[in-house]
Image (tube, rainbow, N blue to C red):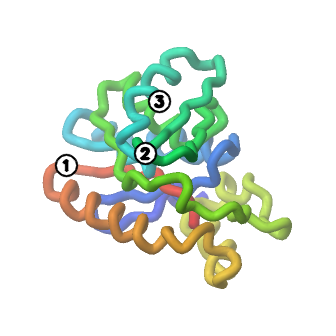
Amino acid sequence: MEHPYVQYGNIHFIPVVRRRLSFAVLVQRAVDSFKEPPLGRRDLVAAALPQSVAGSVTTAIAKLPAISLVVASVPGVPQREAFAVTPCDGMVEAIRIALEHGIPWRCIEPEIAPGFLGDRPCVDANWPDDTLAVERGAERYLDLVQGLLAGPLDRCDPADAGRELYIAEQLRSLRPRYNRILCVCDVA
């Protein structure tokens, strides 16, 4: 199997589809691949979640294997966004591992008012089997799904470009401060 991540300098990206067990396994394999030295206090786990849910996600992870629902809201906006905290989620697994091993972690996604998000599903019916990410590695899986992500109908929301720029800026500012950054983000 190829690497369970895509490397760019000291940043190691793990693309995940949320709430899918295969991607939690991919995160475990990525962490296990850092043997010499193993991930530690000079490294960072970066999760593509908004900072406002960090405390609630940490509390919910402490309750695993019980599944929790974290609800994010923005003051003055009636809509809310829900995040399932389950052991079958790559982002949750990355944060759980960071907490368990004393590895610093942080949320790197911008706060977005849920009312601005679209209601179209991001993944269509022709999405490939998740286990291919585990069997083939992160880069080959991205090559496989690239065509599904390229068209305008497959973008999750017009806000995605802004989110991606924000996440890139967060990683750019964090990059010199850590030996390695394990960035767990949505495959899109």
Q: Residue furthest right?
A: 125
Point out residue 140 in the picture as x, y percentages from the top left corner: 61, 69
Marks 2/1: CA–CA distance: 36 Å
Q: Residue at x 72, y 65 (%)?
A: 120
Dot 2: what SS? loop
Q: Using the image, determine if residue 151 lies above or below residue 185.
A: below
Residue at mark 3:
57
Task: Indicate left or right for 132 with 174 as reference.
Answer: right
Tell me the quarter of the image containing the C terminus. bottom right
Q: CA distance from mark 3 to mark 2?
A: 22 Å
Tell me what residue is drawn at x 45 percent, y 74 percent: 161
**The N terminus: image quadrant:** bottom right
Callout 1 touching callout 3 (CB < 8 Å): no
Q: Nearer the viewer, residue 174 or 142?
A: 174
| Residue receiving disc 2 | 76
Tell me if mark 3 has few (under 14), some (14-19) or many (20+) residues whose alpha carbon lies within 10 angstroms of its own.
many
- Dot placed on the residue nearer the N-terminal end, 3 or 2: 3
Position of residue 120 relative to residue 42, above or below, is below
Q: Give the class, few, some or many, for how many residues have Cα within 10 Å of label 1's Cα (few <14, many ≥20).
A: some
Q: How many marks?
A: 3
* Residue at x-position 62% and y-position 35%: 84
Q: Earlier in the sequence, mark 1 or mark 3?
A: 3
Q: Amino acid at mark 1?
A: Tyr
- Amino acid at dot 3: Val
Question: Which residue bears the numbered disc 1?
Answer: 178
**Which element is circle 1 on?**
loop
